[in-house]
Image: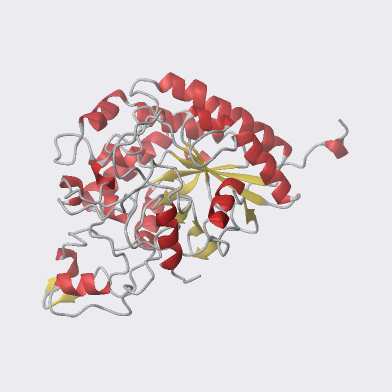
Amino acid sequence: ASAEEEPAPVQRVENPYEGADVYVNPDWSANAEASGGSAVADQPTAVWLDRIAAITGGSAGNSTGLEEHLQNAVEQAGGEPLVFQMVTYNLPGRDCSALASNGELGPEEIDRYKNEFIDPINEIVGKYAEENPNLRIVNIVEIDSLPNLVTNTGSAETATEECNTMLENGNYQKGVSYNVGTLGEHENVYNYLDAGHWGWLGWDTNFQPAADLFNEVISTAPASPDKVAGIAVNVANYGSIEEPNFSIDDTIDGKQIRESKWIDWNQYTNNTDYGLDFAAAVDGGGGLIIDTSRNGWGGPDRPEGPGPETSVDEYVDGGRIDQRIHTGNWCNQSGAGLGERPQASPAAGIHAYAWIKPPGESDGSSEEIPNDEGKGFDRMCDPTYEGNPLNQNNPSGALGNAPLSGHWFEAQFQELLENAHPPL
């Protein structure tokens, strides 16, 4: 090939979202359109690679394979910069503290993860990355994995046998390092590590141990800090960007609001402050992505100002935007709404608000449903469940009649539209 025919070299940028369009997934867009969501059907959402079969297509909610998605992305880009967002989510022993999103690979199957999952993804990504220098591929790496090793291991009340197994065998760390190091070889792949959310790692006892673990993993070959573009928070979760009606430093009648049941001595009240601090604690710094697909909490119950100053609980509960019963509630939350629309650089240090979890795709089934996707039944998705130590024995707050995780959940989507904030 002559010099004229060779693709231009990739220009790596600090924030891939800046000055770029973002890929609209036709699969999700069609579901949204068919469910009365024409106002948002053109919004970009991430493509989830949550099992080996998803690489070629046929994953729940995502009948298109990775190669076809990337081909679509090149067409959507039309030669201009375009971000393609994907979630790589298939570690061995995946989601060791929950059942709804358990994966197909057993705790010891790290070689299958590398050879049958990451390597084939890398082959496809590599081809498109090389031929299309304007394509910016954002890789959200293995949500919920490293945080579980911090909070759900050892002899803690929240520990599980499965998470202790994963801590002992090191396969989460090996898998994340391999994922980051392999895909990070491409100049136009931008890796973001999943760092849970403020209501998970925001306590002193969790924050620094988690940052230390992240730094250890990204410093282990084949990963390196220069192959990490930043972190992602609130992926597939419901926590607010901010809580405008109170601050962590507030006191009511001489008591810190940190003593309230909702904050429970956490150092944070929202995902912006938590996420920016966590990004700063990870080697190489990097930017922050906040998943805003379901944290709008609009509708008639949205508070318009602070709660009454009668007690710390009434003050916080009366003013908080996040209307969940407990910050540990994660499954198909009743009353949730679409959050901020996807946008680049909404505030200093934040690379993007993004809809990483496609709104309308279930978090898990509300009752046991036999399936060949490796997905179990988690009582946190059952509206009648009264809770466990992970959510301090509160009701689950989940919607009923939910399908398997990743499958289209019409009733949830309608509620997200109705309660959107900013409103549609």
Q: Is residue 365 above or below residue 219?
A: below
The quarter of the displayed image where residue 165 is located: top left
Which residue is nearer to you in this view: 170 or 381? 381
Which residue is drawn at the image coordinates 28% and 55% (left, top)? Answer: 199
Q: Is residue 324 above or below residue 189?
A: below
Which residue is drawn at the image coordinates 56% and 55% (left, top)? Answer: 34
**Image location of residue 251, percent across then percent down:** 17, 74
Which residue is nearer to you in this view: 158 or 217? 158
Asked if residue 42 shows in the view, the reply is yes
**Image location of residue 311, percent across then percent down:** 13, 75
Asked if residue 222 shows in the view, the reply is no
Which residue is nearer to you in this view: 424 or 12? 424
Which residue is drawn at the image coordinates 26% and 32% (left, top)? Answer: 163
Q: Is residue 43 above or below residue 60?
A: below
Which residue is nearer to you in this view: 358 or 272? 358
Which residue is drawn at the image coordinates 42% and 33% (left, top)? Answer: 176
Q: Would residue 225 appear left or right of 70 to someone viewing this image?
A: left
The quarter of the displayed image where residue 147 is located: top left
Q: Is residue 147 above or below residue 112?
A: below
Q: Would residue 170 appear left or right of 6 to someone viewing this image?
A: left
**Image location of residue 18, percent across then percent down:** 61, 58
Quadrant, the N terminus: top right
Color scheme of the displayed model: secondary structure
